[in-house]
Image (cartoon, grey):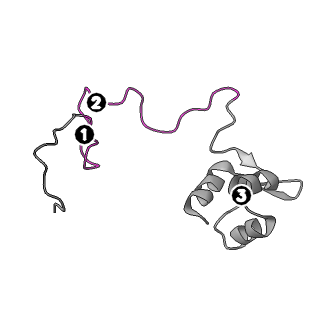
Amino acid sequence: MTFYEPNPEVASTGAEVDEFLDAQPSADTAPSMPPGPRAPRSGDDTSPDRLLDVGEALDVLGVEREQLDALVEGETLVPRGERDGAPLFAEADLLSVRLIGG
């Protein structure tokens, strides 16, 4: 179903994104790298598996400790490890919670 009228003055640039997920890219537009996660490089500390302590989690989320505790209690945020009795959080999880406004 189309919700707009085509505009004859607008021409295709050839760089439009495929409309359907099952569409196969042509050989000239196929990505040069295979899809999937990027392998971490030596010294790369931006791995999605990077664990952050409570202080770093508070900084990433921009919240106070009580708000972090509420996110954990409500299972919106789940600790992925522990160091010296304190929870550790995956950086990717923190960024996701920040993005959705948990």
Query: What's the amino acid at mark 1?
Result: Gln
37 on left or right of 6: right
Which residue, given by chain and number where applicable, does mark 1 sit on? 24
User: What percent of the width, then of the height, locates residue 54?
Assistant: 80, 56
User: What percent of the width, then of the height, locates residue 20?
Assistant: 25, 50
> What residue occupies the far right of the structure in this picture?
84
85 on left or right of 40: right
83 w.r.t. 14: above or below: below
Which residue, given by chain and number where applicable, does mark 2 sit on? 29
Which of the labelled discs sits on residue 62, or is there none? Answer: 3
**Callout count:** 3
Under circle 2, the secondary element is: loop
Query: What's the amino acid at mark 3?
Result: Gly
Q: Are marks 1 and 2 in contact (CB under 8 Å)?
A: no
Quadrant containing the C terminus in the rendered view: bottom right
The prevailing secondary structure element of the residues shown in magenta is loop
Give whichever of discs 1 and 2 has the lower sequence position. 1
Residues rendered magenta in the picture? 15-43
Foreground label between 3 and 1:
3
Q: How many residues crowd mark 2 within 10 Å: few (<14), some (14–19), many (20+)? A: few
Inspect the magenta stretch and tell me whether residue 74 lies in it.
no
Which of the labelled discs sits on residue 51, or is there none? Answer: none
> What residue occupies the far front of the structure in this picture?
9
Under circle 1, the secondary element is: loop
User: What percent of the width, then of the height, locates residue 60?
Assistant: 70, 52
Foreground label between 2 and 3:
3
User: What percent of the width, then of the height, locates residue 63?
Assistant: 73, 62
Residue at image coords 81%, 53%:
55
Give whichever of discs 2 and 3 has the lower sequence position. 2
